[in-house]
Image: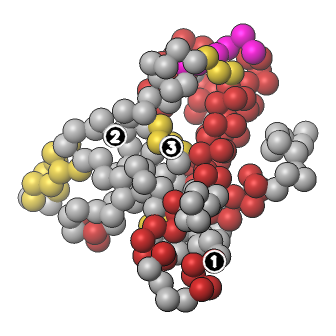
Amino acid sequence: MLLSLVGKERLQRILQRMFDTEEFLSPFGIRSLSKSTGQVFANVGGRDVSIEYEPGESRTGLFGGNSNWRGPVWFPVNVLLADKLRTLGRHYGDSFTIEIPTGSGTQCTLVEAADLIDNSLTRLFRPVDGKRPADGDRIESSDSPLWREHPTFSEFFDGDTGEGLGATHQTGWTALVAHLLNPRLPADPCWA
């Protein structure tokens, strides 16, 4: 909803950064923190701490050793972004385009931008050379065929590799992939 609160020019600038591969755009969706974010320092409770981009597993014990919102791709945020881009695309029409990825020279409508996000998310679950990016090494090395042959629904995904992280049975929000993969459902999630 916040994207609808800004004018066309500011929206253009926001999306320019969002679809920059050196910032938020990953092959697997939109990262939760810009890849180009340097270290940010703060004093918390008399202790100096820093936060920086971490695409996957945390490199520190900060926040319980969980990188959560410091770079990984989160399914619900990406689905909401794609949905809002479709809504804005219906409002602005084909006259409003953005360059995706930033610096490529390729212009896309907002609806096409939403499709790109959806396709990035489904890429996590589609096998490439017999392996799904979301499975990562921890599933691939499992002795159980149940783990190797069926997808897991991770809590969030590495912003660079797409490897599933956090809880592996997060069938709540990550199960939204079923909506994105089901060809019988309308391409546009707005049924109004």
SS class of the residue under badge 1?
Answer: helix
Q: Which mark is residue 87?
A: none
| Residue occupying the far bottom of the picture | 144
Residue in the foreground of this view, choosing between 132 and 6: 132
Q: Magenta part of the protein: which range?
A: 94-99
Residue appearing at x 61%, y 17% in the figure: 107
| Residue occupying the far front of the picture | 129
Q: From the image, tell me which residue sits under label 2.
A: 35
Q: From the image, tell me which residue sits under label 1.
A: 149
User: Looking at the image, is mark 1 or mark 3 earlier in the sequence?
Assistant: 3
Magenta-colored stretch includes residue 104:
no
Exactly how many numbered labels are in the figure?
3
Q: Amino acid at mark 1?
A: Glu
Does 191 sit left or right of 83 as displayed?
right
Q: Is residue 45 above or below residue 169?
A: above
Give the percent coordinates (x, y) of residue 185: 87, 51
Q: From the image, tell me which residue sits under label 3.
A: 27
Residue appearing at x 90%, y 39% in the figure: 192
Q: Amino acid at mark 3?
A: Pro
Give the percent coordinates (x, y) of residue 25: 47, 37
SS class of the residue under badge 2?
Answer: loop
Give the percent coordinates (x, y) of residue 12: 54, 17
User: Looking at the image, is mark 3 or mark 2 earlier in the sequence?
Assistant: 3
Q: Is residue 56 above or below residue 61?
A: above
Circle 3 residues within 10 Å: few <14, some 14–19, many ≥20: some
Circle 1 residues within 10 Å: few <14, some 14–19, many ≥20: few
State yes or no: discs 1 and 3 in contact (Cβ < 8 Å). no
Q: Is residue 84 above or below residue 100?
A: below
Question: Quadrant location of the N terminus?
Answer: top right
Residue appearing at x 64%, y 37% in the figure: 116
